[in-house]
Image (spheres, rainbow, N blue to C red):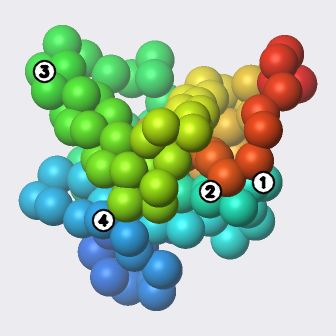
Amino acid sequence: MTTCIFCKIANGDIPAEIVYEDDQVLAFRDLNPQAPLHVLVIPRKHIATINDLTPEDEALVGRMYLAARQVAGEAGLATRGYRTVMNCNSEAGQSVYHLHLHVLGGRSMQWPPG
C-alpha cells in the first residue's frame, strides 16, 4: 500500500517515535495522544480493518497484543493498568485504514469510553 501512512511508517519512509518493533509488528507514539502513554501497535502487513482479518492473521493479532503488553510494562503500567482499543470503521472512530491497536495509560480511564 503505497498511500497508507502506517505502511509508510512501517517501511521507514515516514519518521515516527518507535517504542517497539519486530519482524511482524511495530509500535510508535501517537501524534495526538489522548493519555500520557498513547502508542499505536500496527502489523507490518497491511490489513485495513478488523473485518479484513482472516484466520491466517490469528497469530499476528496475538503478537500485536503481546507487543502492547511489553510497551505498557516498559512504561511501568502493567500493575497500574492500561487500556487497549482497536476501532473498526468510521463510526467506531477509525481514521487510518490500517489495523492498529491503541495502548493508553498513565491516567485513570473512564467507562464508558465515549
Q: Which mark is residue 34?
A: 1
Image marks 2 and 1: residues in contact by CB distance under 8 Å:
yes
Say whether residue 42 is visible. no
4 or 62, nearer to the observer? 62
Mark 4, other Cα within 10 Å: few <14 / some 14–19 / many ≥20: some
Determine contact: label 1, label 4, CB under 8 Å.
no
According to the picture, the residue beneath numbered tag 2 turns out to be: 38
- Residue type, mark 2 in image: His
Mark earlier in primary sequence (1, 4): 4
Residue 41 point in image, percent of width and height: 42, 50
**Residue at point 33%, 22% (across, down):** 53
Q: Nearer the viewer, mark 3 or mark 4?
A: 4
User: What residue would you read off at disc 4?
Assistant: 20
Q: Residues within 10 Å of mark 2 (few under 14, many from 20)?
A: many
Asked which quadrant contains residue 13, the reply is bottom left
Which sits in the foreground, 67 or 86? 67
Mark 3 = which residue? 56
Closer to the chain start, of discs 4 and 2, is 4
Looking at the picture, how far across and down is residue 78, in whole percent? 44, 41
> With 40 as the anchor, is 59 left or right in this view?
left
Gap between marks 3 and 4, in whole Å? Answer: 23 Å
- Between the residue at mark 3 and the residue at mark 1, the CA separation in whole angstroms equals 32 Å
